Amino acid sequence: MNPMPTRRRFLQSAAPLILGSGVLASKSSLGANGKVRLACIGLGGMGTGNLKAFLNDERVQVVALCDVDKQHLAAAAKIAAVKDGDTYNDYREVLARTDVDIIMNATPDHWHSHIILEAIAAGKDLYSEKPLAASIGEGRSVCDAIAKSKRILQCGTWRRSGLKVRIACEIVRNGGIGELKEIEVGVPGKFAIRGGFTGLEAEQQVPPHLDYKRWLGSAPAKPYTQARCHFNFRWCDDYAPGYITDWGAHFLDVAQWGAGMDDTTPTEIEASRITRRDKGIYDAPESFHIEYKYANGVKVVMTSTTDTSKWGTRFIGTDGWVFTENQKLEASDPKILRERPKDGIKLFESRDHHKNFVDAVLSRGQVAAPAEAAHRAASFCHLGAISAKLGRPIKFDPKQEAFPGDPEATALITRQQREGWNA
């Protein structure tokens, strides 16, 4: 077995992609009809939702679809009216097309960075689902590649395009709750397993419509069961650490934005009260309590809970608090919401995450959720997952993105890639 890959080893293996000739190419011309030409890779729930959102933008033309599940592919082809000749099982055939300008990447988490890096090398811009990558090391390699290539990447942390979320973060950034002291993040405390599965299902024969080997990708080779794939991958630690990243990627991203910490992460992390299922494939942390501390002393606490009223991000300051989640905006005192300064910090405004991405592709301008901010938010999640896996507190250096003097934690900066795997 290969040793656990370090960040350096991952970057070395990714170098041919990062330095590929496509990175230096100018953006391909738009289609003859002047539209941005989109290819979608990964067409499950989020992929189909993103596809529909882009179909609502008259500036976008869907020219290709790709999924390892023929059933997903057929359903998406009907929605987008794409011909059989423009549907694919292998994403590399999509990236090789010169008539594709942008990629929508909604593959499982463990595929995110692989698709992103190869799309960058092919000279494509990307709308890619959260978390940005499945590990801290992979996320850094993505950011480095984006910086070198000047490609546009919008991460699917769409709350940055929400009006009430932006208002909440502006209130905090402008001192509306006094000095920020603590941020509370609430996420679900029980897996929302779809399909009636328990995680105890026996091995099954792979159905003819699914390319299971390609679905697994770089993850460990495990027996097929329907309970493992598609939406429920979230609960399997080989692919994702449950709600720590599934919802944490959204709510911790909001915490970062409101705290003004998009270029850093906490330095001290301690996960406790970790519960996992005793048996079965759903072995990610199901409930947890994770405490983080930034270098400036601000504390962040992410707790799993079945109390839906606590799902979201609460900023607590010396003069009150403000809570936000999607369409919610609440405060300890109504005055906090009313008395916002006319002059002060104004955060980037986007009212539509998908349209903002297309705007940026056409103008080479700013996106609401750029790679670096998305990477730091995802790293926030991964730090909690690493502490949970090790069962102890950890300390992190955000500048070096390293665990000084901690080889156990260092070994988890980048996920282990399955020996002999290639795309």
Image (cartoon, rainbow, N blue to C red):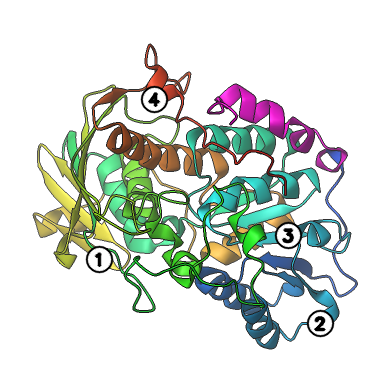
Identify the magenta region: 1-23
Q: Tag 2: residue type?
A: Asp
Amino acid carrying label 3: it is: Ile
Q: Identify the secondary structure beneath mark 4.
A: helix
Residue 328's tag is 1
Circle number at residue 409: 4
Q: Earlier in the sequence, mark 2 or mark 3?
A: 2
- Judged from the image, the secondary structure of the residue bearing numbered disc 1 is strand
Side (left or right) of 310 relative to 134 = left
Tell me whether the residue at label 1 lies in contact with that at label 4, contact meaning CB atoms closer than 8 angstroms.
no
Where residue 267 sits, quadrant-wise, is: top left
What amino acid does circle 4 point to?
Answer: Ala
Secondary structure at badge 3 equals strand
**Cα–Cα span, label 4 and label 2:** 46 Å
For mark 2, what is the residue? 84
User: Between marks 2 and 1, how big is the CA–CA gap?
Assistant: 43 Å
Residue 161 place in picture, x, y as percent: 45, 60
Residue at the disc numbered 3 = 102
